[in-house]
Amino acid sequence: MSRPTRLTQIGLLVLTLALSAGARAVIVEYAVSGPNALGLGPSVYVYNYTVISEPGDSFPVAEVEIEFDPAVVGEVAGTFGSLLGGVAPVAPPGWGAITSAVSTSPIPIPGLLNVFALTPADEIPVGGSLTGFQVAFVWTGGSGGPGNQVFRAFGAPGVIGGPLITEGTTLQVPEPGLLGLLGLAMGLLAMQTRARR
């Protein structure tokens, strides 16, 4: 058997990294739009989320809580006294969404987006996913723009506030270019394998 070439080693490394990135029980992906999302000002952005329950989960996903860091977010839509023109968080049918305010004084407290299934039949089943969660917010973090957030996913059949399934960091939806590179790496591995035969 011949030694693996450098190209094979790189292809295997890329494939390993891509597969290990998704080794969590629940994944929350996001896409962000803005600035001036919804026409409400230059610092207003909108997160759109998809919640994915991996096949190895113990419970269906009944609730997800996402943090808004007070160091970079000034306000989350839907909170009492919001300046975002009465814009409320959005959830898909069968789910509710509430927010809590960001606080910077006297102690910084993150704002929260809490989304939850209204009935056990609406929970995200093990191996399933759900999209359509959306919230507007005021970005105060400078020119870098919004990024990943801390989240917690909870689940138990029909129980809001059930056991913690996963705590993690949201992931930005992969850019098409990254998926293309992954496909290229896998294609190169296949061609090299075929050439050896």
Image: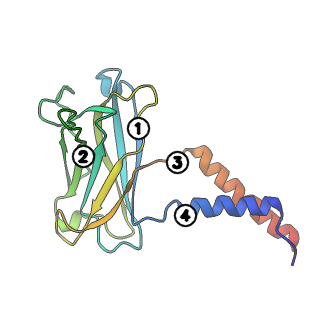
Earlier in the chain: of badge 4 and badge 3, it is 4
Residue drawn at x 66%, y 58% is 14
Earlier in the chain: of badge 1 and badge 3, it is 1
The image quadrant where one finds the N terminus is bottom right
For disc 2, the neighbor class at 10 Å (few under 14, some 14 to 19, many from 20) is many
Q: The residue under label 2 is which amino acid type? A: Leu
For disc 1, the neighbor class at 10 Å (few under 14, some 14 to 19, many from 20) is some
**Is residue 186 rendered to the left or right of residue 94?**
right
Q: Which residue is mark 2?
A: 113
Q: Which residue is mark 1?
A: 32
Q: Which quarter of the picture shows residue 108?
A: top left
Q: Picture coordinates of residue 45 (x, y %)?
A: 35, 31
| Cα gap from disc 2 to disc 1, whole angstroms | 15 Å
Q: Residue 166 or 135: which is nearer the viewer?
A: 166
Q: The residue under label 4 is which amino acid type? A: Ser
Label number found at residue 60: none
Label number found at residue 174: 3
**Is residue 182 rendered to the left or right of residue 87?**
right
Say which element carries label 3: loop
Q: Can residue 94 be seen?
A: no
Q: How many marks?
A: 4
Q: Which residue is mark 4?
A: 20
